[in-house]
Image (cartoon, coloured by chain):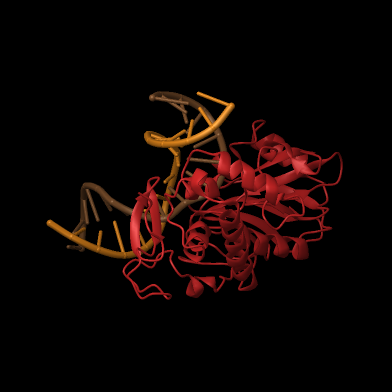
Chain colours: A red, B orange, C brown
Amino acid sequence: MPELPEVEVVRRGLAQWVTGREIAAAEVLHPRAIRRHVPGADEFAARLKGRAVLSAERRGKYLWLPLSGDGEALMAHLGMSGQLLVVDPDSPLEKHLRVRLSFEDGGPDLRFVDQRTFGHIMLSPLVAGVPAPISHIAPDPFEAAFDEAVFTSRLRAKRTEVKRALLDQSLISGVGNIYADEALWIARLHWARPTETLTRPKVAELLGAVRTVMGAALEQGGTSFDSLYVNVNGESGYFERSLEAYGRRDLPCSRCGTAIRREAFMNRSSYSCPRCQRRPR
DNA sequence: GCCTTATCCTGTGTGC
DNA sequence: TGCACACAGGATAAGG
């Protein structure tokens, strides 16, 4: 389940292995992978051919590769199970290979592999350096453009639960279910806490927790649960062993020893400590 | 206009 | 052993 740290690990790999190379051909093996690319697979492939990759960029969970030519980029979202792999062109095709890019230099392919097909890639124009379809996404908390005062005011003006706000990519991007649970555990907040009851200092503490946990995860190469998330070389990160709440149902809280609980939340799960993170009235 | 919910998808694990 | 079903969950369209 790639969130910001995992996507950043992939971005770094792409910057290292793909930047400066010219695309020879693009092959779409599953149309769903480019479902948001309205002109379709043939147009997608034709427009990529002969373009050079200029750099690798990221905002939140979105990645994009600016291309030579006319202000366009190849944009990707990994969804739940998407992988961007840099592999030898002669290596066997992966079972869930969706899109394959080969390069003029005859070096490694860039392959988009995605078991559950929630991810997608597309070509899109850049507007002020950001792909047009994600212009509504807020900066992530590691960007210089992230404005803490604006974030705080907007969060406190909401009428919702704090975890829903953390997952709202138009408020703050890059946070998913795992790091939301971890940040809430650090800040000792229950996920259902109404946003309008949070003081400015408490919001600052929560944001600090978000940055702390995602920064630590990035240092360890990201989190992996079922080998679906890997870097461009197919390797998993090590942050899973550092998780304090997520996925730890019935295991003791490292602060107080109380068993971590799992609660249903938005058709999925939320993990928290019943003692450190009291449910609001 | 804001907020919430249903939907997309497939492999894995569990219970009967 | 085989079957049915729950579960993982980000983004978005649709509904309230």
Count every numbered label the image shows and give the total. 0
Q: Position of residue A67 (x, y in %)?
A: 81, 47
Q: Which residue is at 43% across, 66% downward? A: A245
Is residue A190 visible to us here?
A: yes
Q: Which residue is at 46% across, 66% downward? A: A225
Q: Position of residue A173 (x, y in %)?
A: 62, 49
Looking at the rendering, which quadrant does residue A12 occupy?
Answer: bottom right
Image vertical order of residue A17 relative to residue A177, above or below: below
Q: Position of residue A192 (x, y in %)?
A: 42, 49
Q: Residue furthest right?
A: A69
Q: Which residue is at 32% across, 70% downward? A: A259
Question: In front: A228, or A217?
Answer: A217
A142 left or right of A1 in image:
right
Question: In front: A250, or A47?
Answer: A250
A261 left or right of A97 in image:
left
Image vertical order of residue A255 relative to residue A49, above or below: below
A247 left or right of A4 in image:
left
Question: In front: A230, or A244?
Answer: A244
Is residue A3 visible to us here?
A: no
Q: Which residue is at 72% across, 36% downward? A: A132
Q: Position of residue A162 (x, y in %)?
A: 49, 49
Looking at the rendering, which quadrant does residue A275 occupy?
Answer: bottom left
